[in-house]
């Protein structure tokens, strides 16, 4: 590879050679990236087709692919229920499966394997939210609760609706308005005094100072 690049560099611009080198580096990482994705399943977006999904004039519509497309065709099998292609199971205070929504305390995501607390918490800053999550007890699970990563929190965003952009039957306490932001566990790399948040008006993500009063929803990995 190095000999190949050296010979090319004799008659190619440096910028072009740099692009080739970067492409080779990215290609080398693809197998590891693909393996990581296989262990981190995500929900689909919930965005429906704007026109008929099979319309040849609009070949790249989001709703034409993935779990949402299977749901639209009536061939998606779910372990639980939920809007669009989301697959949720509600749990009561003891951690028992319940079909009575509204009084449920937790939501298990059958796609991602995450267990969500259905309540929303308001803390004065990010550090308080992290600490509150670490001692959280709910649905018979007294450990393992934490703030979700940005990707985890975005996995329950339902982009087929607005304000709030989420399945309101399973997450009825999300709240509305553009100021209704939720903390994640992910710090903002260029400035660690800030942290990534997700707002559920439209489901967008952005970063904010850690010392602001924002909401949080706690999560844990699995039912064990």
Image (cartoon, rainbow, N blue to C red):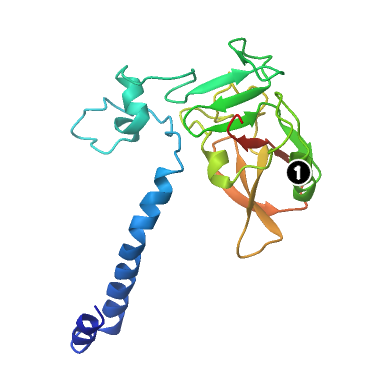
Q: Point out residue 128 in the picture as x, y percentages from the top left corner.
A: 80, 46
SS at badge 1: helix
Please report the residue visible at 57 percent of the width from the left and 46 percent of the height from the top: 150
Q: Is 81 situated above or below 118?
A: above
Q: Point out residue 143 in the picture as x, y percentages from the top left corner.
A: 72, 36
Q: In the displayed image of the protein, which residue is found farthest to the bottom?
A: 10
Whether residue 213 is visible, yes or no, is no
Q: Is 188 situated above or below 133?
A: below
Q: Nearer the viewer, residue 47 or 148?
A: 148
Q: In the displayed image of the protein, which residue is found farthest to the top?
A: 100
Q: Quadrant of the N terminus?
A: bottom left
Q: Point out residue 137 in the picture as x, y percentages from the top left corner.
A: 76, 30
Please report the residue visible at 34 percent of the width from the left and 71 percent of the height from the top: 22
Q: Quadrant of the C terminus?
A: top right
Please report the residue visible at 47 percent of the width from the left and 24 percent of the height from the top: 87
Q: Quadrant of residue 187?
A: bottom right
Residue at which label 1 appears: 129
Q: Nearer the viewer, residue 90 or 17?
A: 90
Q: In the displayed image of the protein, which residue is found farthest to the front?
A: 224
Q: Quadrant of residue 84?
A: top left
Please report the residue visible at 52 percent of the width from the left and 23 percent of the height from the top: 88
Whether residue 134 is visible, yes or no, is yes
């Amino acid at each position: 590879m190095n000999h190949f690049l050296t010979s090319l560099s004799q008659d190619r611009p440096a910028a072009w050679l740099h692009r080739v080198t970067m492409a080779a580096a990215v290609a080398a990482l693809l197998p590891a990236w693909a393996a990581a994705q296989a262990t981190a399943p995500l929900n689909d977006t919930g965005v429906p087709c704007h026109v008929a999904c099979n319309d040849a004039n609009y070949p790249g519509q989001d709703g034409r692919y993935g779990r949402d497309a299977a749901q639209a065709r009536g061939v998606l099998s779910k372990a639980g229920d939920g809007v669009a292609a989301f697959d949720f199971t509600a749990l009561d205070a003891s951690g028992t499966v319940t079909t009575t929504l509204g009084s449920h305390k937790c939501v298990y995501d059958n796609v991602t394997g995450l267990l969500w607390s259905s309540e929303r918490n308001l803390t004065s800053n990010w550090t308080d939210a992290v600490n509150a999550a670490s001692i959280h007890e709910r649905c018979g699970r007294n450990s393992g609760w934490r703030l979700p990563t940005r990707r985890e929190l975005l996995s329950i965003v339902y982009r087929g609706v607005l304000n709030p952009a989420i399945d309101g039957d399973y997450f009825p306490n999300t709240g509305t308005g553009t100021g209704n932001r939720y903390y994640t566990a992910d710090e903002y790399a260029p400035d660690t005094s800030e942290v990534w948040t997700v707002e559920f008006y439209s489901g967008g993500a952005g970063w904010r100072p850690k010392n602001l009063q924002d909401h949080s929803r706690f999560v844990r990995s699995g039912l064990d």
